[in-house]
Image (cartoon, helix red, strand yellow):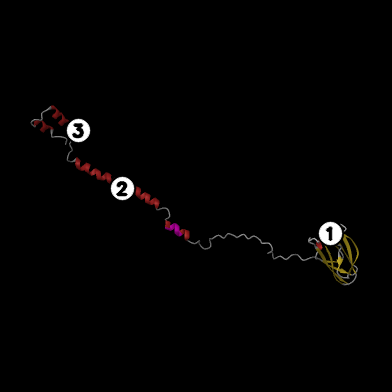
């Protein structure tokens, strides 16, 4: 209470001044009297409000912990990253292999074999021709080739024209005169191969195998 009871203040000796009475009245009006029944009610509200705050804080903390628990833990992530793939589910990436030159197992085509008289060209290099006595074969080659010759007497060359050094294409004819095996050959030729010093230009060899039967 701010001051003594207003009734006692009026009856106390030496306190009858107007200022004192005004002060006592203001104090008595500003400070309400609490009844004995109100004190327990006000005192009981404080723990109820505090409990509500604690319960709210606990609810917020519970929700936060529940949200954090939804993601995988560090141990779970580590275990899943080191766990091997299930059998039968792993994908296999095909490995591309570039082919290497010279590793083909396919053999080169064999030179052709002919039967009977015919005309042979530069593309028939390495071919075999089967002739009977009296049949003939003709040879046509570019101008840089020498006139062809036969390595045996089973074939004779009754006619030839062109070839190095004439500057005209080769045109030669061979006739089978008796049984035997011979080669008809020619090679490229150039003027520098006959000069001094001799040049080192590469030469191409042309060869045909002839088999003469009776």
Q: Which residue is mark 3?
A: 30
Q: Position of residue 183 (x, y in %)?
A: 84, 68
Picture quadrant where residue 208 is located: bottom right
Is residue 33 in the magenta section?
Answer: no
Left or right of 19 on screen, residue 167: right
Distance of mark 3 from mark 2, alpha carbons?
37 Å
Task: Identify the residue at image location x=22%, y=41%.
Answer: 42
Q: For the magenta stretch, what is the residue range?
A: 75-79
- Callout 3: helix, strand or loop? helix
Distance of mark 1 from mark 3, alpha carbons?
141 Å
Is residue 78 in the magenta section?
Answer: yes
Mark 1 or 3: in front is 1
**N-term mark: 3 or 2:** 3
- Callout 1: helix, strand or loop? helix
Picture quadrant where residue 175 is located: bottom right
**N-term mark: 1 or 3:** 3
Whether 128 is drawn above or below 53: the answer is below
Taken as a whole, is the magenta stretch helix, strand or loop? helix
Quarter that holds the C terminus: bottom right
Left or right of 95 on screen, residue 121: right
- Callout 2: helix, strand or loop? helix
Quarter that holds the N terminus: top left
Q: Which residue is mark 2?
A: 55
Front residue (pair 67, 129) = 129
Q: Which residue is mark 1?
A: 191
Q: Position of residue 189 (x, y in %)?
A: 83, 61
Front residue (pair 41, 4) = 4
């Amino acid at each position: 209470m701010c001051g003594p009871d207003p009734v006692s203040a009026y009856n106390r000796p030496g306190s009858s001044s107007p200022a004192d009475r005004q002060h006592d009245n203001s104090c008595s009006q500003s400070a309400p009297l609490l009844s004995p029944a109100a004190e327990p009610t006000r005192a009981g509200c404080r723990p109820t409000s505090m409990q509500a705050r604690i319960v709210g804080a606990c609810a917020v903390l519970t929700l936060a912990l529940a949200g954090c628990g939804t993601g995988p833990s560090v141990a779970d992530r580590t275990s899943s990253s080191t766990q091997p793939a299930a059998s039968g589910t792993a994908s296999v990436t095909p490995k591309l292999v570039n082919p290497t030159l010279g590793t083909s197992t396919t053999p080169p085509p064999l030179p052709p074999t002919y039967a009977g008289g015919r005309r042979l060209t530069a593309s028939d290099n390495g071919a075999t021709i089967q002739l009977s006595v009296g049949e003939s074969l003709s040879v046509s080659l570019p101008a840089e080739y020498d006139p062809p010759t036969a390595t045996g007497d089973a074939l004779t060359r009754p006619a030839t024209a062109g070839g190095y050094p004439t500057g005209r294409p080769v045109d030669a004819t061979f006739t089978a005169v008796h049984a035997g095996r011979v080669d008809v050959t020619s090679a490229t030729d150039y003027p520098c191969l006959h000069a001094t010093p001799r040049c080192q230009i590469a030469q191409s060899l042309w060869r045909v195998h002839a088999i003469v039967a009776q």
